[in-house]
Image (cartoon, helix red, strand yellow):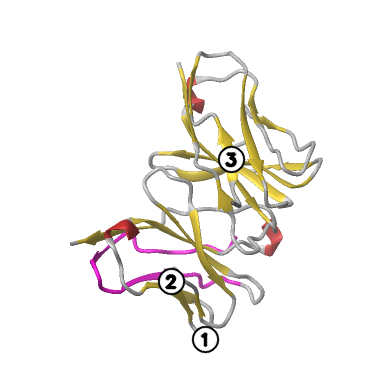
């Protein structure tokens, strides 16, 4: 898997947009970027993934830079229930089947 | 409802007593995987399977066995549990080993070995 770097923690006010960055400078041309989150000891939850273009679904938006070396997950209107650990993952083709979770970013949404 | 089901949710056992944690998915996914999560160490992959009868070691396979006799089930077997296997375990499945449309995780099994 390509190495990813995320800030250890971030804060966000309820109702505001949460922008979570991720660096993946060693990403290869055909590798996707995935985002998951884990809410206190629950199973990780898939959020979104993308290759080159920006992506949006009912949960979030994913912005990938043109050089693909970094991405930003955007939660447009954060709620208290969005408080979780957010993981940015780039599963590598040469390590098919292995999905490596880093330490992620602890996002705290406060009232 | 598409889901990954793990059982049991909680288990307390004694050292050396063989146990099995079951995992079943109803999405016809080819890929399944087991993880353990420990404070400060994050999620670490134990074993994964890319299809029936195809399994491979993850990052921390010692002390565990798995089998994939049918597509929907991927049990995790601890032949002789030890206290250092006390952990929170998650099973996951996906249509692809690189993630496909995203992995679906089970709710977790909290295992305590005394």
Q: Which residue is mark 2?
A: A60
Would you place residue B31 above or below residue A82 in this image? above
Helix, strand or loop status at disc 3: strand
* Distance between mark 2 and mark 1 Cα atoms: 19 Å
Taking depth in this image into account, of A47 and A70 the one nearest to the observer is A47
Which class describes the residues within 10 Å of circle 2: few (<14), some (14-19), or many (20+)?
some
Residue A55 located left or right of residue A22: right
Residue B8 horizontal/vertical position (percent): 54, 29
* Distance between mark 2 and mark 3 Cα atoms: 26 Å
The chain that hosts pointer 1 is A
* Distance between mark 1 and mark 3 Cα atoms: 39 Å
- Which residue is found at the position 39% from the left and 71% from the top? A21
The chain that hosts pointer 2 is A
Give the foreground label among 2 and 3. 3
The chain that hosts pointer 3 is B
Q: Which residue is mark 3?
A: B5
Residue B63 horizontal/vertical position (percent): 62, 27
Q: Which residue is mark 1?
A: A66
User: Which residues make up the magenta segment?
Assistant: A1-27
- Which residue is found at the position 47% from the left and 54% from the top? A102
Which quadrant of the view contains residue A84?
A: bottom left
Helix, strand or loop status at disc 2: loop
Magenta span contains residue A24:
yes
Residue A76 located left or right of residue B51: left
Marks 2 and 3 in Cβ contact (< 8 Å): no
Magenta span contains residue B62:
no
- Residue A22 makes an appearance in the image: yes
């Amino acid at each position: 898997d390509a190495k990813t770097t995320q800030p250890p923690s971030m804060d966000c006010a309820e109702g505001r947009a949460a922008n979570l960055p991720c660096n993946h400078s060693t990403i290869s041309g055909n590798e996707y970027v995935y985002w998951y989150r884990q809410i206190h000891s629950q199973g990780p939850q898939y959020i979104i993934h993308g290759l080159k273009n920006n992506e949006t679904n009912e949960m979030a938006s994913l912005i990938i830079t043109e050089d693909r070396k970094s991405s930003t997950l955007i939660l447009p209107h954060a709620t208290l229930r969005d408080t979780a650990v957010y993981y940015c993952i780039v599963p590598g083709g040469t390590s098919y089947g292995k999905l490596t979770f880093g330490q992620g970013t602890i996002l705290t949404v406060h009232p | 409802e598409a889901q990954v089901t793990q059982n049991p949710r909680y288990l307390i056992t004694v050292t050396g007593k063989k146990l099995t944690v079951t995992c079943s998915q109803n999405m016809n996914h080819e890929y399944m995987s087991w993880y353990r999560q420990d404070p400060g160490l994050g999620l670490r992959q134990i074993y994964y399977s890319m299809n029936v009868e195809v399994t491979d070691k993850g990052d921390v396979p010692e002390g565990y066995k798995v089998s994939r006799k049918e597509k929907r089930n991927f049990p995790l077997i601890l032949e002789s549990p030890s206290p250092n296997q006390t952990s929170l375990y998650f099973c996951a499945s996906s249509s692809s080993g690189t993630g496909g449309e995203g992995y679906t995780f089970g709710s977790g099994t909290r295992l305590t070995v005394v």
